[in-house]
Image (cartoon, rainbow, N blue to C red):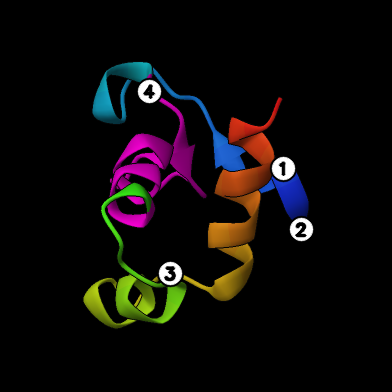
Amino acid sequence: MTGISRITFDPEVMGGKPCIRGLRITAGTVLGLLASGHSAQDILDMYPYLESGDIQAVLEYASC
């Protein structure tokens, strides 16, 4: 799974907000952390179930 296909939408997960691979972490959460100065590595340390490709996918999604 690569790129923007990692961003999923499911009304049963987080109210249908764009999430990462169906997990209960939204693209908005990751974007907010990046915007507040956290590095990608900080985010990966905070959420060990995320992968570096997930963060890249969030950035790709946000640029659309």
Which residue type does callout 2 highlight?
Thr
Q: State which tag comes first along the sequence, 2 or 4.
A: 2
Residue 34, image quadrant: bottom left
Q: What label sits on residue 50 in the rendered view?
A: 3
Does residue 2 appear to the left or right of 20 in the view shown?
A: right
User: What is the C-alpha distance between the residues marked 3 and 1?
Assistant: 15 Å
**Does the segment drawn in magenta span residue 15?**
no
For mark 4, what is the residue? 17
Local SS, label 1? helix
Q: Are marks 3 and 4 in contact (CB under 8 Å)?
A: no
Q: Residue at x 45, y 44 (%)?
A: 22
Q: Are marks 3 and 1 in contact (CB under 8 Å)?
A: no
For mark 2, what is the residue? 2
What segment is highlighted magenta in the picture?
17-34
Q: State which tag comes first along the sequence, 2 or 3.
A: 2
**Does the segment drawn in magenta span residue 19?**
yes
Which residue type does callout 3 highlight?
Leu
**Image quarter (top left, top right, bottom left or bottom right) of the C terminus:** top right
Q: State which tag comes first along the sequence, 3 or 4.
A: 4
For mark 1, what is the residue? 5
Does residue 7 appear to the left or right of 37 in the view shown?
A: right
Local SS, label 2? loop
Residue 16 picture location, percent across and down: 37, 19
